[in-house]
Amino acid sequence: MDLVLKTFQKDNLLDFIRTFSIPVGIMILIAMMVIPLQPWMLDILFTSNLLVSLLVLMVALQTFRPLDFSSFPTVLLFATVLRLGLNVASTRVILKSGHNGTDSAGAIIEAFGDFVMAGSYAVGLFVFAILVIINLIVITKGAGRVSEVAARFTLDAMPGKQMAIDADLNAGIMTSEEAKTRRNEIAKEGEFYGAMDGAAKFVKGDAIAGILILVINIIGGLIIGTVMHDLTLNESAETYILLTVGDGLVAQIPSLLLAMATATIVTRIASDKDDLAGQISNQMGLSKAWVPVSAVLLLFGLVPGMPNTLFLIGAFFSGVIAWFTSKNKGQELINEEKEDLDSDENIGKIDIDEVSDNASVSLDLGYGLISLVDSNDKKSAGPLISKITGIRKQVSKDLGFIIPNVRVKDDLSLDANSYKIRIGHTIVAEDKLYVDRKLAMPGDETQLQVQGIQVKDPSFGLDAFWIEQHLVAKAEANHYMIIEPEAVIATHLNQILLRYAGELISQDDVQSLLDNLSKSNPQLVQSVVPKLIPLHYLTIILRNLLVERVPINDLKKILEALSNLSEKKLSPDELSEAVRPAISSLLIQKISNVNEALDVITFNPEFEQMLITMSKKSGSDGLLIDPLLAKKMIKSIIDVGEKSPTESNSLVIVTSPVIRKDLSILLRQHIDDIVVLSFTELPESKRVKVIATIGEQISTTEKENKNDNTTV
């Protein structure tokens, strides 16, 4: 118990330090600029400043990629402010107490001044000037320019990178989680280089400030020493210049280290394996490069009058390095050969990934259609990928759940112009198209037939022609609708996704929908799932609704309806039927506008009663109906649809709740866009217009064949 308590207290202490270290540090920096400091305090702070600068440089050298040190711009800001605060504090001490001697501003300033000046303050000034020039003009200016260019190129490349991620996501190369992580990295990368562009200005401003502070200290020291403390000009110059140069060196060395860290970060090339030292050693460790170096140095070592010993020693060391790098390269080749042998031994092995494909939706393309996926512009995806992304978004919005990624891949077993659409491993659609042509579909006013490959449109089964590019203008002038090849596949895929939506939703998808709903209605979700309705029951119910294209957008209303039906102990299929009246308006509003009447087809009472009687006799085996009777009924419905003046593509049949489900199963096998509603699903506020009544002639046929029933 005591150990747990100590651990808890330790964690609290660490959290306290992390939380308040930066605010306290900022307050200390402000205090340094206002409150006079003692020389020994300056020594401690100058040492800390040097420590921080060395630490930042070492971290910059050890990172694998610039984003690993994403806090660098902020750290650079605080380090710069710390150094400027020390300059202010040390200037105050130098000008106030400099007349007392060179030790009046602390041991570190005196030591740096004595060491660099070597007895001559003129030498100290020149050495300091050289350090400032190196820092300001060479390192800081170069790092600032690299930061500016890197920020510009990174921000310009962000849209292309985002599109590449979307393309990989749609092609199934990466998962949604991986795509989310990659997008976050790209956003952070843009923010980092944008911040580095500004942070480089801190270093440049700090170097300029160092020069100005040096001039102020020297001029101020000479005036104060000669006027206020009766020192000679030579004594004032010797004392104050030593202190000023020492102070400037103590500040410029950490500034130089931070400038090197900045340059290292912005010139760093990202690597997942090596830090900077590893990259340099791997790339410069080439025996082919070291051998000529050794030969040239040896040649210089043999020339009379040259420092032969030094050149010969350099040639020897270069040769040794060339020998070691060559030996290591040979070992790497041996290891690669061993790996190749191991891979040859594993040729007969089959990986599970080679025979298993867990993609929910797949689009297989012949090699002639690959150009629809690839793009000449590396910053953008192919036209087909963009179309598929738009379709997935629209279908997901219409149905109420996220349609899985469509895995697009090439299939060499297909003809060049063929494609197949799979749901799971089942091929549900296939057709052909021509990338170098366009699909022309005739309109109502079209009279002239264009030359091309005559086909049936894969989505609607209408007559169409694949025409060459030079005939497009002529076809448009004759009222043909021109469709791009990628739009043909996309439209076909759109129909497949709508038709097989019930097979695409999984328990994981349903759980995601529940998690999202629980943010706004937590009690409803907790009280229904899984207390009243298990998750797998709810999944079956939603699948049954989607099979008949009933949107599940309003999951709240579905759960409320299910909560009212929980006491009836119904099966999932029965619950699916019982919940339809609560959400049927979502389906109806997609078929008919709000202010317009809903065009419906009904059965006459005698024929409908006949179907109800058949359904009761059939029980759970489905609707038993004579094939000839079923054929005539379906033909009558199709004829009504062809003659119907309605603009909707869907035929709507209204019938009794008793036979609605069985009749829907029967009709959907023969008519794609058909909606079968029960009387209880019609909203009270919706006007209904009966455009046809089917049954009289069919009923007569049934009486003649009533003894010849079979399951359809």
Image: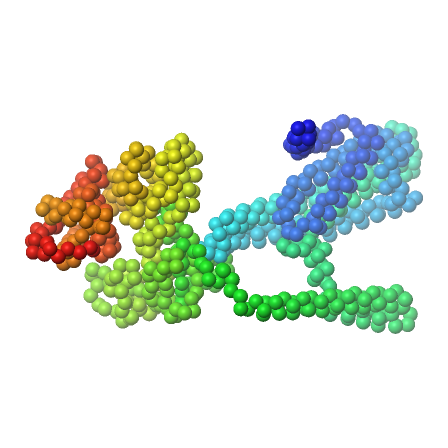
Q: Residue furthest top?
A: 35
Report x, y in % for residue 150: 61, 52
Q: Where 499 falls versus 680 (above or below)? A: below
Q: Residue at x 29, y 39 (%)?
A: 570
Q: How many marks?
A: 0
Q: Can you tell which quarter of the image residue 443 is in?
A: bottom left
Tell me the residue at 84%/31% (across/down). Answer: 40
The quarter of the picture where the N terminus appears is top right
In the image shown, does 504 or 104 lie closer to the viewer?
504
Give 150 or 490, whichever is nearer the viewer. Answer: 490
x then y, percent, for residue 526: 41, 33
The relative height of residue 158 versus residue 95 in the rendered view (above or below) is: below
The correct choice, above or below, for 487 with respect to 127 in the image is: below
The spot of residue 383 in percent (x, y) is 41, 59
589 relative position to 379: left or right:
left
Q: Residue at x 65, y 69 (%)?
A: 337
Residue at left 21%, top 36%? 685
Identify the image quadrant of the C terminus.
Answer: bottom left
Q: Is residue 301 visible?
A: yes
Q: How is the image coloured?
A: rainbow
- The picture quadrant where one finds residue 433 is bottom left
